[in-house]
Amino acid sequence: MAAFFDVSFLTVQVLSALRQAAFLFLISSGLTLVFGVLNILNFAHGSLYMLGAYFIYALTLHLTGPAGFVIALLAAPLGVALVAVVIEMGLLRRIYIQEEIYQLLLTYALVLIIHDMAKIVFGPEFKSIPKPRAIGGAVTIFGGTVPVYTLVVVVLAPLVALLLWYLLYRTRTGKIVRATSSDREMADALGINMSALFTLVFAFGAMLAGFGGALAGPARTVFPSVGTEVIIECFVVVVIGGLGNLWGALVGSLLIGTLETVGIIVFPEFEMSFIYLLMVVVLILRPWGLFGRPLKVKALAEKNLGMEAQEISPVHFSVRPLVRMIPLVLLLIVPLFAGRYYQYLLTQILIASLMAVAFNLLLGTTGLLSFGQAAFYGAGAYTVGLLATKTGIGSLSSLLLAPLVAMVVAGIIGFFCIRLSGVHFAMLTLAFGQLVFAIIYKWYNFTGGDNGIQGIPVRPLPGGIDIGSNLSMYYFALAAVAVAVEILRRIRSSPFGATLKAIRENNQRAEYLGVNVKLYQWTAFVIAGAFTGLAGGLYALMEKSISPDIILWTKSAEPVLMTIIGGIYSFAGPAVGAVVFIVLNSYLVAWTENWALVLGLILLAMVLMLPGGAVGFVNEKARGAFGKMGWVRRWAFSKSGAS
Amino acid sequence: MALLTLDSVNTYYGRSHILFDVSLAVEKGEVVALLGRNGAGKSTTFRSIIGLTPPMSGEVRFKGEKVNGLRAFRICRRGIGFVPEDRRCFPDLTVRENLEVAVRREKNTVDPWTVERVYALFPRLQEREKNLGSQLSGGEQQMLTIARTLMTNPEMLLLDEPSEGLAPLVVALLADMILQIRKEGVTVLLAEQNLNFCAKVSDRGYVIDKGSVKYEGTMKNLLADDEVKEKYLAV
């Protein structure tokens, strides 16, 4: 600690914190601006940052010397803005009318696509960008050695902040931007062209990200996944500061920049945890962030418009119970004739289906977008992993404990999360998920840290039934998943499930009817968490080794993707999505190293063309076809009791 | 030719049918009242005209040209100004900024509204020029939204329940201002529940109930028609 009182040391650290804050501010100011006006939390904003870094890399290959560097530094963000214009006008604009989640998903698809495009064009390796000699050296300040480039960054970022202030508060367009972010419809009725404004703001936000990337490129290195790393940090910044608030982004950047620098010196073990902990604490104390204010409830008409745009078919092509048994029978027979690899693949599908169906109890049934399901998945997996390696407990007992532990974790996390709604809820679950990840990732003594747990023993079930082989493990998983899914199905169609749907449709009205909305949401959260934990436990037994990767936020994105692919308004949708996702994933990985690109394009097509999901699409088609033949329809639906 | 005509307009929110064959006409220079209870369809009529909730069928014509189907900002630029019922000033902008945002420069209006001109009409706004929208009283907010809409140089104003929730003294003041605005050559369509307020400012009135027009006539006749008043307007 004595080192802290050393002036030279302090100087170096303060400047390093400021530099970090400067980068964060450049990127998150664009993110928050876009959110304020377009109401879209842009996952691809980090990818635009990455493009900025690659663009300056490509430009400096041809432009050398100080003048060339300056030109590249200014041209790269313009290039990014151009890409953003294409994205906004070509893709985003088509789905403004859809619900928030489809917009999130579209930007997530862009993350995958841009990542692989960068990999294809620039290669997967790390690239470094040379700095001109004039700013490449170091100077001594108060006895501490500081790179000149750090000083450049620390001076430029406040200038950009000043410029932003000027644009937003002193120009007419800036005033229009501020007006629109508080009341879009009113601005429209005052004769302001929203389409043009959206394109402008999206491009401008992207330009800020691109400038951040171009400026950070020479200080850091560039590689394709730099975008996904930076975006989560920026989410933390804007959520802490208050979504849509520029000053929030500034203060949030300074806080996170400082915390990261201090964290690395004082508690290198738990530096990451600190950031997420700060976010969790802020969101609990001030759910709308330090400078934010509660999100407006959308005007009635606007909401209805959204509903209509993705009209859900009221008649579901519901099959008779006997027909429903067919998949189960197939699931029982097929593996007998499949090779070991396919048995393993099918087990994977079962586990993923369980995770997705459990998740959809939150999204499709209750209307809660959780982005932290990986925490419960991990809780289940680590329960099994730790119990199996540290105690002599049987596999079945450890598997039964997995959902219980996940339930407790979900109970605690849910207690805080259900106080928020919409995008804030999603962000808080994300923060908690990342917090759990950060703890497990660094807690070497207990969890094995980033090494994970290898060689998880699979012990015979009571009665001496061995589940060590791929085939027996498959049947074991099938039994567990079948029971779990049936319970979830009954929950969904019970009065409890009906109440959850009522909450999804209109939680205010549910509240007026005397429903304790928060309690119901919490219960649904805990149930979903428990079954996700069960899926995690099964995963640990199947893989026989686990690593903290299964708790990373990208894992939380998986059930979201599966559910959207399959369709959120049908019970079987998420399971179908899981099949598609796992099969695609394993085949794409085998077929091309750019699987993310293909997955991204498929997602993009889904969002733009089939917003009801695959199962919703089939339902719709079935309804259309049967609608033309009245007697078939009467026959098909009268017996199943659906109307 | 009427300045604004609605011809058998049908409007839906999602699947619910709200307006049923609404037809009305407003002549240039008139102040026309659209009377009805809460939920009768007054706001929906306005939203249909300005394009925020476009009608499913029927026609909205302004200066003889069909405007339904155009986006809201285009309809505004044709010369219809909309003042919504819940006022909706931009809370984070100062009074002056609220006005500046609405200025339309490209328009070749003979005698365009300027910040100074609306300040002359609403002196109170000048006093509060540097205050944020969120710091104003209800009456001041109402003045600001009207003033802001005037900045778009409308030929016609749609005023949605301007007297709602205001003190009687402020309502009286508002009535004067509407007459003043009319003198400046702006046609006004006024949605109200307050019959006495309408009696002071308007020439003609329509009564709307459950999404369709039930009565139309001069304010004088309407005031004398106890049956209509009893049936559609009494609380």
Image: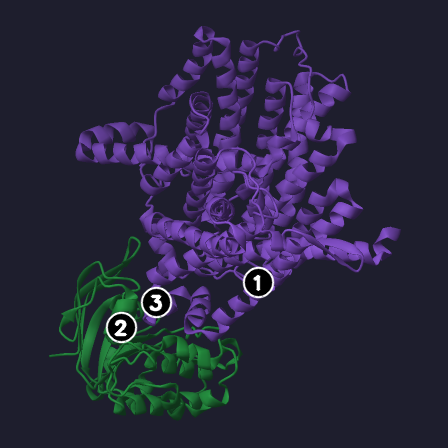
Can you say whether A7 is above or below A434 in the image?
Answer: below
Q: In which quarter of the image is the C terminus of chain A?
A: top left
Mark seen at residue A292 = 1
Q: Which residue is drawn at 62% across and 58% down?
A: A152
Tell me residue A334's x, y (percent).
Answer: 43, 11
Amino acid tagged 3? Asp
Task: Identify the image quadrant of residue B67.
Answer: bottom left
Note whether B45 is above or below A476 in the view shown.
Answer: below
Query: Which chain is indicated by disc 2?
Result: B
- Neighbor class of circle 3 (other Cα within 10 Å; few <14, some 14-19, many 20+) is many
Q: Which chain is green?
A: B
Circle 1 — which element? loop
For disc 2, the marked residue is: B77
Residue for badge 3: A188
- Answer yes or no: are tags 2 and 1 on the same subunit: no
Name the residue nearer the viewer: B14 or B126: B126
- As measured in the structure, the alpha-carbon distance from the residue carrying label 2 to the one carrying label 1 is 33 Å
As shown in the figure, which amino acid type bears the numbered disc 2? Arg
Q: Chain A is drawn in which colour?
A: purple
Q: In which quarter of the image is residue B114?
A: bottom left
